[in-house]
């Protein structure tokens, strides 16, 4: 099953694309697993996700914590941390 990933702001700039559809391995079950998996896809992903704990994630446009399951996600968005107030 393919999962749509959407990248925002400097995450998008570092990875070099706005979105992509990827097939995730069976052992990628949480947001944290996803970030670890993506870091292994190449140096641009490694650069974008070098501080995975700082990355904010939305599953189907709803904010998700890093321990949340991604099963059934149609779209997963990755954002840099929010700045300012």
Image: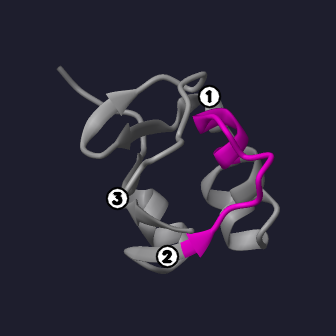
* 78 w.r.t. 83: above or below: below
Left or right of 76, for residue 31? right
Give the Cα distance between marks 2 and 1: 23 Å
Please report whichever mark, 3 or 1, sits nearer to the chain's N-terminal start: 3
Q: Which residue is mark 2?
A: 21
Left or right of 48, for residue 56? left
Left or right of 46, for residue 60? left
Disc 3 element:
loop
Disc 2 element:
strand
Q: Position of residue 11 (x, y in %)?
A: 47, 58
Q: Quadrant of the C terminus?
A: top left
Between 15 and 19, which is closer to the camera in this rendering? 19
For the record, the magenta segment spans: 22-35
Please report whichever mark, 2 or 1, sits nearer to the chain's N-terminal start: 2
Q: Position of residue 79 (x, y in %)?
A: 39, 46
Mark 1 surroundings within 10 Å by alpha-carbon count, few (fewer than 14), some (14 through 19), many (20 or more): few
| Residue shown at 42% from the left, 44% from the top | 80
Give the Cα distance between marks 3 and 1: 16 Å
Q: Position of residue 68 (x, y in %)?
A: 53, 25
Between 49 and 28, which is closer to the camera in this rendering? 28
Q: Which residue is mark 3?
A: 8
Q: Residue furthest left?
A: 85
Between 38 and 2, which is closer to the camera in this rendering? 2
Give the Cα distance between marks 3 and 2: 15 Å
Q: Which residue is mark 1?
A: 53
| Residue shown at 41% from the left, 34% from the top | 81
| Residue shown at 51% from the left, 38% from the top | 55
Residue 29 in magenta stretch: yes
């Amino acid at each position: 099953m393919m999962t749509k990933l959407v990248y925002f702001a400097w995450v998008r700039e570092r990875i070099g694309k706005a979105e992509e559809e990827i097939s995730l391995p069976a052992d990628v079950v949480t947001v944290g697993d996803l970030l670890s998996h993506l870091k292994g896809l190449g140096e641009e992903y490694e650069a974008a996700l070098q501080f995975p704990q700082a990355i904010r994630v939305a599953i189907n446009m709803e904010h998700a914590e890093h321990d949340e399951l991604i099963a059934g996600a149609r779209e997963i968005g990755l954002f840099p941390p929010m700045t300012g107030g």
